[in-house]
Image (cartoon, helix red, strand yellow):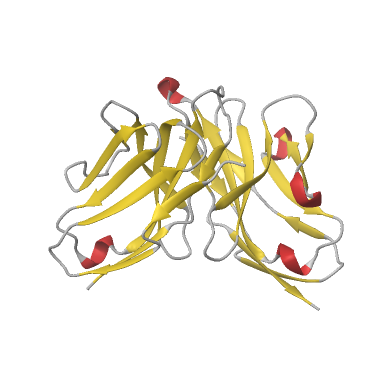
């Protein structure tokens, strides 16, 4: 099957520091990866769409300078939360789509990263 | 813009009983509809999806869902639940505004199974 792995699964950081979250497709190549944020008892909200080799497309209201996304290879996308504050504490989830499958091919999800900013 | 409503935050069902999880969507065109399941500490797994054709869709793990355009609904059903079905379930609607695929998720329904 297709496996997407996120690292770390949990992270606690101090306010003002930056945190990097990795999303890897372990057994397939992904030209497109998606980053979501999930607040307690709320929906997954799409933050940005990441395409390999190009700039990410951010959703309205998402600060691209605060949430830096890099998709440098077909198997890795990273989300860096810069100058983190307590309100950035959340559950971040990525998903990845297989490069050789068409429109609305299944996106495989990572297990998520719980970020706590203290 | 599209939206999804899952009216039930938490449902408790006895093992072996039938299950129906509700999902209502709002979208101007023909929707692409999905159901995902999330177990604790794990990623989301696709249960089934509807794009077109037969409005009754069969998925994995014995789940099915029925698309009803007149009611803007895509309810998930299972005739007999197992303890392993306890998880969080998310309904999602897909759209491609400007060619960019986007999934909009509902708030989820937590399913508890009792013996």
Q: Residue at x 41, y 21 (%)?
A: B98
Q: Position of residue A65 (x, y in %)?
A: 16, 43
Q: Position of residue A86 (x, y in %)?
A: 23, 67
Q: Residue at x 75, y 43 (%)?
A: B59
Left or right of residue A13: residue B90: right
The outermost residue toward the front is A27
Between residue A19 and residue B74, name the one nearer to us. Answer: A19
Whether residue B58 is situated above or below residue B30 in the rendered picture: below
The outermost residue toward the bottom is B115
Whether residue A84 is situated above or below residue A49 in the rendered picture: below
Q: Residue at x 25, y 64 (%)?
A: A87
Location of residue A91 by image quarter? bottom left
Between residue A90 and residue B84, name the one nearer to us. Answer: B84
Location of residue B67 by image quarter? top right
Q: Position of residue A107 (x, y in %)?
A: 53, 38
Left or right of residue B45: residue A113: left
Between residue A114 and residue A23, name the one nearer to us. Answer: A23
Whether residue A73 is situated above or below residue A5 in the rendered picture: above
Whether residue B17 is situated above or below residue A57 in the rendered picture: below
Q: Position of residue A1 (x, y in %)?
A: 62, 42
Location of residue B11 by image quarter? bottom right
């Amino acid at each position: 099957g297709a496996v997407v792995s996120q690292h770390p699964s949990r992270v606690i950081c101090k306010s003002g520091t930056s945190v990097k979250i990795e999303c890897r497709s372990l057994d397939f190549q992904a030209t497109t990866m998606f980053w979501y944020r999930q607040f307690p008892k709320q929906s997954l909200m799409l933050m940005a769409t990441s395409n390999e080799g190009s700039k990410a497309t951010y959703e309205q209201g998402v600060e691209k300078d605060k949430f830096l996304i890099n998709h440098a290879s077909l198997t890795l996308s990273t989300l860096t939360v810069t100058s983190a504050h307590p309100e950035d504490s959340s559950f971040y989830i990525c998903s990845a789509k297989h490069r050789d499958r068409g429109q609305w091919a299944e996106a495989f999800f990572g297990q998520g990263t719980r970020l706590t900013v203290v | 813009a599209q939206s999804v409503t899952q009216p039930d935050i938490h449902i408790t069902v006895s093992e072996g009983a039938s299950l129906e999880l509700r999902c209502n969507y709002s979208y101007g065109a023909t929707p692409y509809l999905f159901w995902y399941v999330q177990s604790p500490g794990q990623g989301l797994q696709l249960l089934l999806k509807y794009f077109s054709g037969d409005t009754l869709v069969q998925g994995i793990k014995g789940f099915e869902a029925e698309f009803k355009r007149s009611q803007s609904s895509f309810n998930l059903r299972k005739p007999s639940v197992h303890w392993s079905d306890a998880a969080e379930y998310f309904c999602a609607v897909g759209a491609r505004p400007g060619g960019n695929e986007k999934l909009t998720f509902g708030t989820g329904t937590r399913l508890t199974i009792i013996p």
